Image (tube, rainbow, N blue to C red):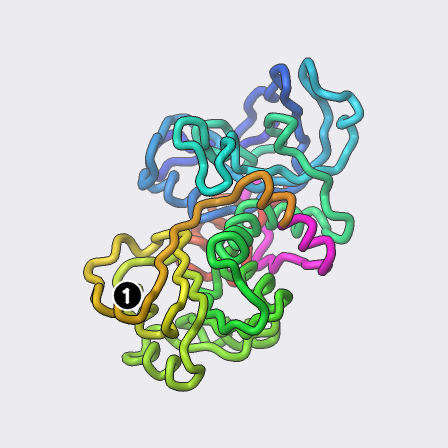
Amino acid sequence: MLALTFTAVNEMKVSTVPDPAPSPGEARVRLRAAALNHRDLWIKLGQYAGLKWPCIPGSDGAGVVDAVGEGVDAAWVGREVIINPALAWGDNEHAQDPATFSILGLPRDGTLAEAVTVPATQLAAKPAHLGWTEAAALPLAGLTAWRALMCRAQLRAGERVLVSGIGGGVAQFALQFAVAHGAEVWVTSSSTAKITRAVAQGAKGGFDYTQDGWAKRAATETGGFDVIIDGAGGPGVDALIDAAAPGARLVFYGATCGNVPEVALRKIFWRQLSVLGSTMGSPADWTAMLAFVAQHHFKPVVSDVFPLAAAADAFALMARGGQCGKIVLTM
């Protein structure tokens, strides 16, 4: 099969490798499409824990089961599926088990290949209303957005929500889920075009986070946000705190801009803010998210599609932040 392999920091190639064989309890999925996440870019750049070379990255994928290992119902063979990339979450709904939890694509070989093996428990039927590229775009970002909004923030209809960095995949899902749940949603971006697109998707409006004082203006115009969803972190967190309404919940699912250099702690305790962390999602979150997607006939926003052989171009697009939605590779 063809696979994208990282051979060292910033070194990658698409080449022929042996097909993986399913072990007991596993299924092999012949992939039709796979999607990129920032996690894949960080692994490529050597900026992720537990690096190993060579490795096949990729957490998102959709395809057809073509083989199963011992102990797996043979009825899976021939089914169209998507893959839950959150492996071995554990029994605690409040947080993943650090001793067992991992994400598909490192250390286990991932989906940027023509086939992948995973525990059969990670499989779910491909939503019937989604094409292959849309289905591949759903798992990691959709699950992350769902848990951040619905589990950690406990979003309620009618609340005001701010989603930062609307060009990213998780942010796109957060916008869609929150709008469908009856929230009033605003977004941030440095791109007017991305804000305009978000408004077309149901956002009330947006703010350019590169402009000085944007957060205080946003708070004045909207009354402040009850829920803020952010995956950037870094120095921009202080502005997000300024945009929060009293009693707001701020959920952080990533840190693409690094650690927060300084926080005015008095703003947090005086205004009764809740600061919440969120990573991926539990099996229960996965099931609830898929049901919500099916109920509302969501279609993930696919920004760009590349063949697997052009994976280098896909990674270059992600590195410069040129996408608005998910970047998908087809097999």
Please give the residue where the numbered disc 1 appears in the rendered image. 268
Q: Is residue 197 visible?
A: no
Of residue 112 and residue 199, the one placed in the foreground of this image is 199
Relative horizontal placement of residue 10, taking residue 82 as reference (left or right):
left
- Residue type at mark 1 is Ile
State the residue at coordinates (48%, 27%): 108
**Does 19 appear above or below 313?**
above
Judged from the image, the secondary structure of the residue bearing numbered disc 1 is helix
How far across and down, in percent of the image, does residue 21 sit? 62, 18
Of residue 64 and residue 215, the one placed in the foreground of this image is 215
State the residue at coordinates (41%, 52%): 253
Count the numbered circles shown.
1
How far across and down, in percent of the image, does residue 114 sit? 62, 32
How far across and down, in percent of the image, does residue 83 sit? 62, 37
**Does 216 appear above or below 178?**
below
Relative horizontal placement of residue 142, taking residue 53 as reference (left or right):
right
Which residue range is magenta in the image?
289-310
In the rendered image, which quarter contains the C terminus?
top right
